[in-house]
Image (tube, helix red, strand yellow):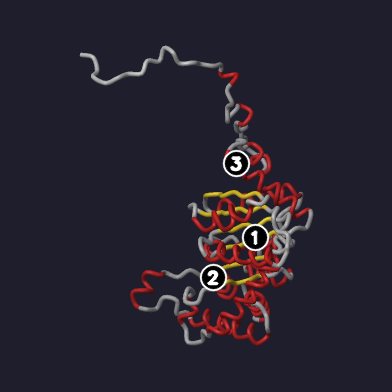
């Protein structure tokens, strides 16, 4: 029994040769074979010339150019970057002054201080929450809250004082600290805090006036570096809210004061696509002439790959690790 519904006949459709059609993928874009013993650079070159693999090579080129031309490379990050053990990857690039500015949220500063002083961090939140002991480590709070007070008294930035204070304390594991590396290299490290978000705010030693003033000074320090970002690169790694919001405001201040900040590269690294990093770091700031991309994946894989590929391009071996 024939169908009751109208059918559109295909006999009259117009066709054309595939040779006259624009194709988005060609064989020349395909990956090249991989083999045992390939260098990191050879592996990256063997990736397909498509999608994120193409963006990865573009980012490497922008980073290489920024380092060679001594332009700004700002690294914005959250606590997860510290907790996934990436200091040995990032610290050498701070030591070499490839990275010209570190900016972190309060969580990253807490974890970094704990690693530097005690060689451990990241407590079991669930078990500590049940009995009210979560975040109650007295040494951590004493160190960070005292540093905030000292920063206020000395008119220093929060990150600046934390790095100096760790050096003054001869932190046993300082070689694995972002803050220590920045202090040693003379690279600005800024800490951007929302009151009530960090475990040290639960302690009676926390003073809002000190924390707020030190963190606000760090905002102004970051804004000065953002004002020099033309031709440079900014990476946001693992911060979904705080650092993208802070960066957007710092960029606004720099442009409001007449700084030309238009042509720079911006990239976001995270395990999922987040609204603020995508809009406030990658898309909105680069619409006037820059370039942006998002890289979805695990920091503990992507950042070492990026650092190794960049060192190979620049012809600089990675310095030996701590110890």
Specify the quadrant of the image occupied by residue 10: top left
Where does the image place residue 256, in percent across and percent down from the top left? 67, 66
Where does the image place residue 177, in percent across and percent down from the top left? 62, 69
Q: Identify the residue at image location x=60%, y=26%.
A: 27
Name the secondary structure under disc 1: helix
Of labels 3 and 2, earlier in sequence is: 3
Residue position for label 3: 53
Cα–Cα span, label 1 and label 2:
15 Å
Total number of numbered discs in the rendering: 3
Residue position for label 1: 90
Q: Which residue of the protein is positioned furthest toward the right in this rendering?
A: 69
Q: Identify the residue at image location x=37%, y=69%.
A: 126
- Of residue 241 and residue 87, the one placed in the foreground of this image is 241
Image vertical order of residue 70 relative to residue 24, above or below: below
Image vertical order of residue 101 relative to residue 158, above or below: above
Quadrant including the C terminus: bottom right
Residue position for label 2: 111
Q: Identify the residue at image location x=75%, y=55%.
A: 67
Specify the quadrant of the image occupied by residue 261: bottom right
């Amino acid at each position: 029994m024939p169908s009751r519904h109208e059918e559109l006949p295909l006999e009259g459709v117009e066709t054309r040769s595939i040779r006259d059609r624009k194709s988005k993928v060609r064989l020349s874009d395909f990956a090249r074979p991989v083999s045992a013993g390939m260098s990191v650079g050879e592996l990256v070159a063997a990736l397909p010339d498509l999608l994120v693999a193409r963006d990865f090579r573009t980012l490497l080129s922008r980073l290489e150019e920024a380092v060679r031309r001594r332009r700004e490379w700002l690294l914005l990050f959250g606590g997860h970057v510290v907790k996934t053990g990436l200091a040995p990857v990032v610290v050498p690039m701070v030591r070499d002054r490839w990275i010209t500015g570190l900016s972190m949220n309060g969580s990253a500063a807490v974890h970094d201080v704990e690693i530097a002083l005690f060689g451990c961090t990241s407590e079991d939140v669930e078990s500590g929450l049940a009995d009210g002991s979560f975040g109650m480590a007295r040494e951590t709070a004493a160190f960070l809250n005292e540093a905030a007070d000292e920063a206020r008294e000395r008119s220093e930035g929060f990150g600046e004082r934390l790095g100096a204070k760790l050096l003054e304390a001869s932190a046993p594991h300082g070689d694995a600290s972002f803050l220590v590396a920045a202090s040693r290299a003379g690279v600005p490290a800024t800490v951007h805090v929302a009151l009530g978000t960090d475990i040290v705010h639960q302690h009676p030693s926390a003073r809002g006036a000190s924390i707020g003033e030190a963190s606000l000074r760090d905002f102004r320090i970051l804004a000065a570096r953002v004002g020099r970002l033309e031709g440079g690169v900014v990476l946001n790694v693992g911060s979904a809210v705080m650092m993208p919001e802070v960066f957007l405001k710092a960029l606004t201040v720099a442009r409001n004061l007449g700084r030309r900040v238009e042509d720079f590269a911006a990239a976001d690294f995270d395990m999922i696509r987040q609204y603020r990093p995508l809009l406030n770091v990658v898309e909105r700031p680069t619409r006037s002439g820059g370039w942006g991309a998002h890289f979805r994946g695990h920091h503990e894989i992507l950042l070492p790959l990026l650092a190794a590929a960049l060192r190979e391009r620049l012809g600089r071996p990675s310095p030996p690790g701590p110890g």
